[in-house]
């Protein structure tokens, strides 16, 4: 909150009052334009979501006949009744277990590795970083069956560890954390080091709190990624008792994917899947805005 | 720096090697255990898995109920798994040497598995083997042997919007290509086209057969580039050119049935899956179903589509799996499925019951007599997709070129298998 | 002397700590990614049909045959690989710059300290990223339909919109014909690369692909905005204040202060974007299956069809590794161009 008054003081000191007023008009126009653009973007970005919610309460013919109108011509709960007959609560529970464990694992492992790769000097650091980027470059569609064979070999196929452990770290997350640490000034940690704190102490009590904005981003991405994952969870289990929302809903209509039927059911399921992520996002996004020092930077 | 990089590489390589070595010797990765069980062996009490891709809750419930009834009768437990992605999950089962004991299998994938020799060729040993419709049996024949039992049947027929038909003042449904063309012309108005057909090979190949052409010879040679076939495509192209026939993409529809449901077309060549579509999505459309018109020389032909009950050789309870298939392919059980989610039975004995119970759909059964199975060649999905893509551009391309290119590509696939 | 040894022990401590802190990630990635990748690499050299383990005794090596069929032998596999690489190349060229610029723009906008409703805007822009791909696909099929919203807007402008998802003509080719070049020059029509004439390589993305490009930009810009945000907030406000004191205007401040500080994040977003766009699969699988006329085929989708539909696992894996080589080469190139340097952390990378 310090930048703005500073700015106006400096500028009003330098320019004539007439130029100030024309500048003010321009600034006002600029601001209006900015809000207008942002608002239009927001509508474009949110509309599909509203449409999904609305369609979930439509009948099949209504959904087909009025695809772009989010308001049902008459509201029905068919799609939700149908979902209720499935093991929806079980799927929800499994999704929570998987997403929470995976998110926790990624926060810890990715931030540790990202910090080490950005800050600690050790032999092989460059090679490890290059390897982490390289493994992302292999298209995952050809890795599905090999991944399944590995899970089987390890004896964790068709179990919770089989669903969770392979996802507990991700190359992209390590990359995100490393790049974040690269963009933060190392002075604070160096102060801690001079105070004689060990590397792990420094990491835990100085670095992590400082990295909060990046950790929040990682939380959102990890939660969303594991919550919406389909392929990796599908190859890890067969038993319906281990189904998550994505694989469970997949069972409903896999025989006719792509056909124009049952949009309401699919979208009701999609909404039931999406809303928790939306809540997580909404709760966490405000914390991104706290500055590196942990204080509120408003 | 260089040294450390080499060290890391070496460590990684060693780890991979150690792991893969473990894999090749470990139990999970061993070669498929060739089961000694035969059709005559006694079922053991190992529970069976039945995997299928569901079209919706009605089908899931019906399959669950059938499995429960089987367990009650035989004492063999069945785990029913509605697949989230059938192709992937079955592939995974074979890779891990634990394929489901009974699963839905489409004709194209069937060719692949049959070529690999992993399917139990039980079908000819079924007591009612001769009762399956011939076109359906042909879809599951590999090197002359009837391998797995078809579970249902679909054929293409002509759907006519009765309101449009009456408004145009038309009488009997079209019996041949000329009438189809003239009726389509009369049905074409400003906002509506006379006829819609699907733009891929499985929506178009029936016209080749009606013109006296074929797609595959009995010895498996590709015969797409015949003059009859060129003539058939030319016929379709002329209707596209005059605008009395359109492809669904021209009508902003994902498939022809959607265009028909939205009344953007008055006639549609499509299979019986359209019935469910019309019922749930377009309940207000009044329609009738007729056999496809005959070609210029009076040949009747249509395409048939089906799935079979695949059973892997390596099933741990092969005899039990075959018992389950027998249970699922009785006249009575097939009718139960038909009543539950609308499929047409594969057994001729059940088909006559079906035709009596649903006279409005009897056409589909009648057409099975002259149906040809939709083309299926091992490893040909990409070549067939390319053929379909070319057909989609029929209006702007030369029919002979489309056919000769597809001929080359498909024949290359056939040759590479030898 | 004493100082030197202390520095040496610090160095050793950093080495130990470095390996220890990266160990969990290394182990997990090794087991669940590197090993599967090694298996897939072997599959690309073998005749594995998907039955039993690829390491069982009935599977044998076919050398580079799968790669040869794709790269050197004329035929459908080669031609489709050529087409898919062409399609994907244009997809990357359009999506990566646009989504990066848009994400950065949105991130800068919603990080403004005096923006009313910041939380709302941040959430709004992230929504496409969390909406299910089924829903997004349905919506795009409708809004880009020939009578859809987009064409209605085009109609207001007096033009006639195309039949988006069914139009295989390349947008660059349309531009050439606008300039009067309707026939391919013989040199471009008769010579080519990977079974595709140069004229086809120069066709640009098809109209159908453009719709998918728009979809991709729209769904991923929110995600990348989220990655830019922490980096923007890590810029010390003193720096900006100093620039203001120096009389720099907003544009100069962005290029001289903000942008250099965002280089690590930019490198991150570009790299992740490049990798993801070269592997585009979901939208193709859900929306177009490579149609119309093969103009939305992508290598990842081809690899999927070859593997799961045709059970030519060797060919599918070979496509994936050709793609892998392209991505690695481009990432290295990009890194050289951008010189992954954090301005603050210095040249430590």
Image (tube, rainbow, N blue to C red):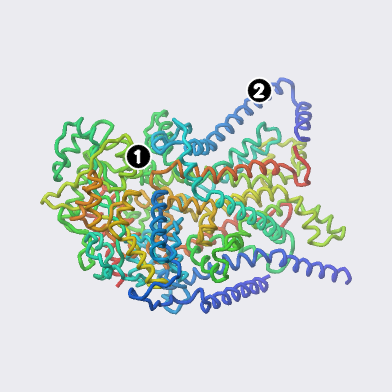
In which quadrant will I find the C terminus of chain B? bottom left
Asked if residue B243 shows in the view, the reply is no
Discs 1 and 2 lie in a common subunit:
no
Instruction: Residue C347: name its quadrant.
Output: bottom right
Instruction: Residue C256: name its quadrant.
Output: top right
Q: Nearer the viewer, residue C200 or B31?
A: B31
Q: Give x and y (percent) for residue B364.
A: 23, 49
Q: Label 2 belongs to which residue?
A: A25
Q: In the image, what residue occupies the spot 15% across and 38% down?
A: B182
How far apart, in angstroms, are the residues tagged by discs 1 and 2?
48 Å
> Mark 1, residues whose alpha carbon is within 10 Å: few (<14), some, or many (≥20)?
many
Tag 1, which chain? B
Q: In the image, what residue occupies the spot 28% across and 64% down?
A: B140
Q: Give x and y (percent) for residue A197.
A: 84, 60
Tag 2, which chain? A
Q: Nearer the viewer, residue A225 or B143?
A: B143
Asked if residue A44 shows in the view, the reply is yes
Residue A200 — which label?
A: none
| Horizontal relation, residue B374 to residue A96: left or right | left
Q: Residue furthest top?
A: A18
Q: Nearer the viewer, residue C132 or C214?
A: C132
Q: Give x and y (percent) for residue B254.
A: 36, 44
Instruction: Residue A13: name its quadrant.
Output: top right
Q: Nearer the viewer, residue A247 or C211?
A: A247
Q: Label 1 belongs to which residue?
A: B252
In which quadrant will I find the N terminus of chain B? bottom right
Vertical placement of C133 versus B225: above or below?
above
Q: Residue furthest left?
A: B297
Q: Secondary structure at mark 2?
A: helix
């Amino acid at each position: 909150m310090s930048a703005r008054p500073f700015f106006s003081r400096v500028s009003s000191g330098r320019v004539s009052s007439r130029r100030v007023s024309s500048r003010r008009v321009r600034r006002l126009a600029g601001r209006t334009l900015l809000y207008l653009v942002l608002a239009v973007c927001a509508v474009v970005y949110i509309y599909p979501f509203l449409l999904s919610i609305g369609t979930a309460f439509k009948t099949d013919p209504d959904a087909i006949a009025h695809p772009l109108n989010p308001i049902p011509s008459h509201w029905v709960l068919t799609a939700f009744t149908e979902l209720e007959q499935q093991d929806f609560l079980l799927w929800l529970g499994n999704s929570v277990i998987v997403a929470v464990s995976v998110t926790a694992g990624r926060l810890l492992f990715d931030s540790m590795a990202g910090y080490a790769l950005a800050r600690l000097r050790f032999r092989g650091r460059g090679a490890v970083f290059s390897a982490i980027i390289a493994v992302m470059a292999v298209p995952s569609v050809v890795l599905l069956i090999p991944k399944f064979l590995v899970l089987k070999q390890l004896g964790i196929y068709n179990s919770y560890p089989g669903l969770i452990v392979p996802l507990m770290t991700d190359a992209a997350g390590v990359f995100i954390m490393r790049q974040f640490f690269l963009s933060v000034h190392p002075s604070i940690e160096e102060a801690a080091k001079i105070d004689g704190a060990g590397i792990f102490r420094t990491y835990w009590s100085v670095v992590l709190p400082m990295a909060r904005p990046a950790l929040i981003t990682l939380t959102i991405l990890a939660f969303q990624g594991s919550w919406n994952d389909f392929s990796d969870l599908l190859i890890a289990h067969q038993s319906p008792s281990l189904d998550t929302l994505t694989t469970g809903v997949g069972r409903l209509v896999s025989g006719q994917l792509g056909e124009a039927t049952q949009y309401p059911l699919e979208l009701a399921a999609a909404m039931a899947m999406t809303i928790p992520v939306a809540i997580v996002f909404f709760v966490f996004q405000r914390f991104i805005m706290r500055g590196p020092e942990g204080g509120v930077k408003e | 720096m260089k040294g450390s990089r080499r060290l890391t590489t070496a460590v990684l390589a060693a780890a991979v090697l150690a792991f893969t070595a473990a894999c090749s010797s470990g139990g999970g990765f061993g070669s498929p255990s060739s089961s000694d069980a035969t059709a005559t062996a006694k079922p053991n009490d190992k529970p069976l898995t039945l995997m299928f891709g569901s079209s919706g809750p009605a089908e899931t419930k019906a399959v669950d109920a059938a499995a429960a009834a089987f367990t009650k009768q035989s004492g063999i437990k069945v785990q029913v798994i509605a697949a989230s992605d059938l192709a992937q999950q079955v592939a995974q089962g074979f890779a891990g040497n634990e394929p489901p004991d009974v699963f839905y299998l489409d004709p194209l994938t069937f060719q692949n598995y049959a070529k690999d020799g992993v399917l139990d060729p039980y079908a000819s040993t079924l007591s009612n083997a001769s009762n399956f419709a011939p076109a359906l049996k042909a879809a599951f024949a590999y090197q002359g042997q009837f391998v797995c039992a078809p579970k249902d049947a679909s054929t293409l027929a002509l759907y006519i919007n009765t309101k449009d038909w009456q408004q145009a003042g038309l009488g009997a449904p079209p019996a041949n290509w000329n009438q189809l063309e003239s009726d389509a012309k009369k049905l074409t108005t400003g906002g509506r086209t006379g006829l819609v057909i699907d733009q891929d090979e499985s929506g178009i190949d029936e016209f080749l057969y009606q013109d006296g052409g074929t797609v595959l010879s009995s010895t498996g040679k590709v015969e797409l580039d015949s003059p009859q076939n060129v003539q058939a495509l030319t016929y379709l192209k002329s209707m596209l050119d005059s605008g009395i026939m359109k492809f669904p993409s021209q009508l902003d529809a994902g498939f022809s049935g959607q265009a028909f449901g939205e009344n953007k077309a008055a006639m549609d060549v499509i299979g019986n899956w359209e019935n469910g579509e019309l019922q749930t999505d377009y309940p207000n459309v009044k329609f009738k179903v007729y056999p496809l018109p005959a070609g210029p020389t009076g040949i009747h032909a249509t395409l048939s589509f089906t799935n079979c009950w695949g059973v892997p050789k390596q099933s741990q309870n092969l005899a039990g799996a075959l018992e389950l298939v027998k249970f699922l392919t009785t006249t009575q059980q097939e009718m139960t499925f038909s009543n539950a989610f609308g499929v047409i039975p594969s057994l001729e004995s059940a088909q006559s019951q079906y035709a009596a119970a649903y006279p409005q759909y009897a056409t589909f059964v009648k057409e099975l007599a002259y149906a040809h199975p939709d083309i299926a060649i091992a490893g040909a999905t990409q070549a067939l997709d390319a053929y379909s893509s070319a057909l989609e551009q029929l209006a702007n391309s030369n029919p002979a070129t489309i056919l000769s290119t597809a001929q080359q590509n498909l024949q290359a696939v056939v040759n590479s298998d030898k | 002397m004493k100082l030197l040894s202390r520095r040496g022990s610090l160095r050793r401590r950093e080495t130990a700590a470095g390996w220890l802190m990266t160990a969990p990630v290394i182990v997990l990635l090794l087991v669940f990614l590197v090993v599967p990748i090694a298996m897939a690499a072997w599959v690309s050299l073998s005749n594995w049909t998907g039955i039993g383990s690829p390491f069982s005794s009935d599977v044998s090596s076919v050398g580079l045959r799968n790669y040869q069929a794709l790269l050197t032998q004329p035929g459908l596999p080669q031609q489709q690989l050529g087409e898919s690489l062409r399609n994907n190349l244009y997809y990357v060229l359009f999506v990566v710059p646009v989504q990066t610029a848009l994400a950065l723009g949105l991130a800068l906008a919603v990080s403004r300290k005096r923006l009313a409703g910041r939380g709302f805007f941040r959430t709004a822009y992230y929504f496409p990223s969390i909406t299910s791909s089924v829903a997004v696909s349905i919506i795009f099929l409708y809004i880009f339909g020939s009578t859809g919203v987009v064409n209605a807007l085009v109609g207001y402008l007096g033009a006639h919109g195309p039949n988006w998802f069914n139009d295989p003509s390349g947008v660059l080719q349309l531009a050439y014909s606008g300039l009067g070049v309707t026939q391919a020059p013989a040199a471009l029509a008769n010579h080519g690369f990977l079974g595709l004439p140069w004229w086809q390589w120069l066709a640009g993305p098809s109209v159908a692909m453009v719709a998918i490009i728009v979809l991709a930009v729209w769904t991923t810009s929110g995600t990348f905005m989220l990655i830019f945000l922490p980096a923007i907030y890590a810029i010390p406000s003193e720096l900006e204040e100093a620039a203001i004191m120096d009389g720099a205007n907003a544009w100069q401040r962005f290029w001289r202060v903000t942008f250099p500080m965002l280089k690590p994040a930019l490198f991150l977003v570009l790299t992740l974007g490049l990798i993801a766009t070269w592997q585009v699969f979901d939208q193709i699988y859900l929306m177009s299956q490579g149609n119309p006329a093969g103009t939305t085929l992508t290598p990842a989708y081809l690899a999927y069809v070859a593997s799961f539909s045709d059970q030519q696992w060797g060919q599918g894996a070979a496509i994936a590794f050709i793609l892998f080589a392209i991505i690695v080469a481009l990432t290295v190139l990009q890194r050289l161009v951008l010189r992954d340097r954090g301005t603050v952390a210095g040249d430590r990378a």
